[in-house]
């Protein structure tokens, strides 16, 4: 199956160059979305650049890139993610062998080699309140919400997931066409949860494929403070999510 890649750039010159160099040899075509003026890097021979006249949301940019590509599988990646050799092939091979796999995500590691928990459960109201308010100082999420982050499991074989962190996601184009792509109404944050949730409702599977390895220099900006533009964007994103999927208000 052919694989296209979409990378959205907001600058990140050093990271972007490393990301593109690692990704280009692993895909059939690559589109770089320059979301800010000057956020362009040297593009590989199988790549091209689409420059925005004004900044757009991550989800909207993904849709633009997906529409500009033709692969049966589309990999969306952020500049802080460096795909190790064979990562895309491992994801694509798994998706090709499992026709109902709509989304596949890799194992992610911090730059120092530590494992990142990127396979998550769909959010609940209570768990989200704890994670995004000062309550997390009393009830540290990585200690009290181990099931949400899948911390007690370190699978070495593919396993299903509720949702996967959106830094690198391989998606089946047929699934994207069925569910209408990413929801551009999310300003920033939660759009990856929404994508996975809508794919689940449409009967598509989401899989964590640990043989595909990606180095991810994740900033985790929304976890650094309780009141910032990022935490507000996250709150707005969660509010949109529960408006769209009110059944999650009762989820435990």
Image (cartoon, helix red, strand yellow):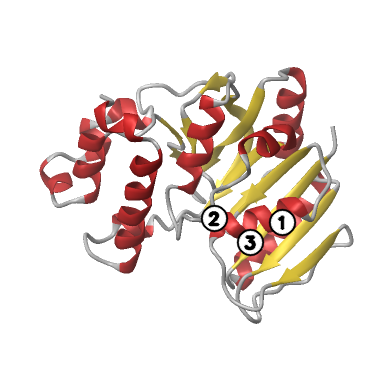
Could you tell me how far apart the alpha carbons at marks 3 and 2 are, in whole angstroms? 14 Å
Residue 77 in picture, x, y percent from top left:
63, 51
- The numbered mark at residue 184 is 2
Q: Are marks 1 and 3 in contact (CB under 8 Å)?
A: yes
Q: Relative to the observer, which residue lies in front, 23 or 47?
A: 47
**Residue 156 in view (yes/no):** no
Q: Does 238 appear above or below 156?
A: below
Residue sticking out furthest to the bottom: 37
Look at mark 3 in the image and give the residue it sits on.
8
Residue sticking out furthest to the right: 45
Q: Does 244 appear above or below 218?
A: above
**Residue at x 73% of width, y 20% of height:** 99
* Disc number lying in front (3 or 2): 2
Could you tell me how far apart the alpha carbons at marks 2 and 1 are, in whole angstroms? 13 Å
**Residue 16 in view (yes/no):** yes
Look at mark 1 in the image and give the residue it sits on.
65
Residue 108 in picture, x, y percent from top left:
53, 40
**Residue at x 26% of width, y 41% of height:** 128
């Amino acid at each position: 199956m052919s694989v296209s890649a979409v990378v959205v750039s907001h600058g990140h010159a050093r990271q972007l160059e490393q990301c593109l160099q690692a990704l280009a040899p692993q895909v059939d075509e690559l589109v770089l979305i320059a979301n800010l003026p000057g956020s362009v890097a040297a593009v590989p021979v199988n790549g091209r650049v689409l420059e925005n006249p004004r900044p757009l949301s991550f989800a909207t940019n993904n849709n633009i890139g997906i529409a500009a590509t033709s692969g049966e599988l589309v990999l969306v990646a952020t500049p802080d993610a460096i795909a190790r050799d064979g990562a895309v092939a491992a994801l694509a091979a798994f998706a090709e062998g499992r026709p109902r796999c709509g989304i596949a995500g890799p194992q992610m590691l911090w730059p120092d080699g530590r494992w990142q928990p990127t396979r998550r459960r769909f959010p609940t109201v209570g768990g989200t309140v704890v994670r995004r308010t000062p309550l997390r100082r009393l009830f540290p999420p990585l200690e009290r919400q181990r099931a949400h982050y899948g911390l007690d499991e370190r699978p070495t074989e593919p396993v299903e997931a509720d949702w996967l962190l959106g830094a690198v996601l391989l998606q089946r184009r047929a699934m994207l066409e069925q569910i209408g792509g990413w929801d551009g109404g999310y300003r920033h944050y939660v759009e990856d949860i929404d994508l996975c949730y809508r794919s689940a409702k449409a009967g598509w599977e989401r899989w964590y494929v640990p043989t595909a390895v990606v180095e991810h220099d994740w900033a985790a900006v929304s976890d650094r403070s309780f009141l910032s533009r990022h935490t507000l964007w996250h709150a707005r994103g969660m509010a949109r999510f529960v408006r769209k999927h009110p059944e999650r208000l009762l989820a435990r």
